[in-house]
Image (spheres, rainbow, N blue to C red):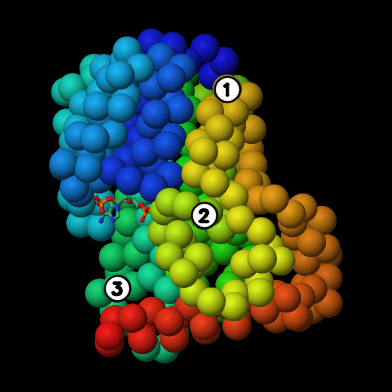
Amino acid sequence: MRELAGRNAVVTGASRGIGRHIAVALAARGVHLVLSARSEPELERTAAAARARGVRATVVAADLAHPDGAAQLVERSLDEAGAIDLLVNNAGVQCLGRFARTDLDTLLDAVHLNLISVLQLTRLLLPGMLERGRGHVVSIGSMTGKAGVAYNVAYSTTKFGVVGMTQALRAEYHGSGLGFSVVIPGIVRGDGLAAWLQDVPGLRARTLVGTTTPARVAQATVRAIQRDLPEIVVNPTPVRPLLALAALAPRAVEPIPRIIGVPEMYRRALAYRDHESRA
Ligand SMILES: NC(=O)c1ccc[n+]([C@@H]2O[C@H](COP(=O)([O-])OP(=O)(O)OC[C@H]3O[C@@H](n4cnc5c(N)ncnc54)[C@H](OP(=O)(O)O)[C@@H]3O)[C@@H](O)[C@H]2O)c1
């Protein structure tokens, strides 16, 4: 969708982190916004930043880990905006931890928020987009959805799902005028769910893999929509050759994350988090 000015977008997870940056980047291009998350005061802050760029911005609080959350958000969004041209599936949780010790409620919440609500929002907004012959759905994936990562089992599972959803939608709706993209950030610094990692001492993998910024993820999101790109990886080091190699020779590539210390990074992060929560 080349021309963004005057379009209506729903952005989930817009109360903070990457979602706030995406909302402001879209507002700067003239997109009117329906902003969603659970925390209304934080959403109002994002809405104020968007309105300062001259667009309409409405706040709709919704819990997308709840089975009815997505349907309620769609209903309210259509009431507020009339028609929705853009859906940004950004809300997500990482639920970092040892899988065997993850309780079922945590697992269900993560699957619901990161995957089921993404499918549900897309499914409910698609008919209107098809009717108008235009629309774009962009979902925020993760590197953990391109290569399974230790201590991120539920997160990886849901993020692989988002990549699969995007590919399948592109195949099914090719030629419809609709676009579908997935944006794959590496570790984001400064803001967002991984920002706390910068306080954990000695994370070699974080240095080796590198970090990106929420602003870069937001720029990539806008680019994906405008050019209908299937997938953009946002990471300072070139990971695509490694992913290609992993597809060709999974066993040969499997030790690489261990060698650069990715599981160790998350072990240390978990130990740090447990220590901080006890302190
Ligand atoms: N940060 C990274 O390093 C990184 C890397 C790769 C991918 N990502 C992906 O980027 C996306 C945004 O992450 P972030 O880093 O910006 O995380 P964040 O700062 O923790 O923000 C998460 C957003 O999701 C919302 N959210 C959480 N639980 C929700 C629920 N049950 N219902 C509705 N909204 C909910 C939060 O708002 P409320 O708490 O107000 O509901 C917040 O707006 C996620 O999909 C994440 O997986 C992040």
Q: Secondary structure at mark 1?
A: helix
Pinpoint residue 34: horizontal percent, then vertical percent.
27, 29
Q: CA distance from mark 3 to mark 2?
A: 25 Å
Residue 169 visible in image: no
Question: Which mark, residue 189?
Answer: 2
Q: CA distance from mark 1 to mark 3?
A: 36 Å
Q: Nearer the viewer, residue 221 or 110?
A: 221
Which image quadrant for residue 45? top left
Pinpoint residue 121: horizontal percent, then vertical percent.
33, 41
Q: Secondary structure at mark 2?
A: loop
Q: Nearer the viewer, residue 51 or 163?
A: 51
Label 3 environment density (alpha carbons within 10 Å; few <14, some 14–19, many ≥20): few
Residue drawn at 73 percent across, 76 percent down: 260
Residue on which the image places disc 1: 226
Q: Is label 1 in contact with label 2 (beta carbons under 8 Å)?
A: no
Q: Earlier in the sequence, mark 3 or mark 2?
A: 3
Q: Image height check: is 253 above or below 194?
A: below
Amino acid carrying mark 3 in the image? Thr
Q: CA distance from mark 1 to mark 2?
A: 25 Å
In the displayed structure image, the side of residue 57 where residue 101 appears, left or right: right
Q: Is mark 2 within 8 Å of ligand 1?
A: yes
Residue on which the image places disc 3: 106
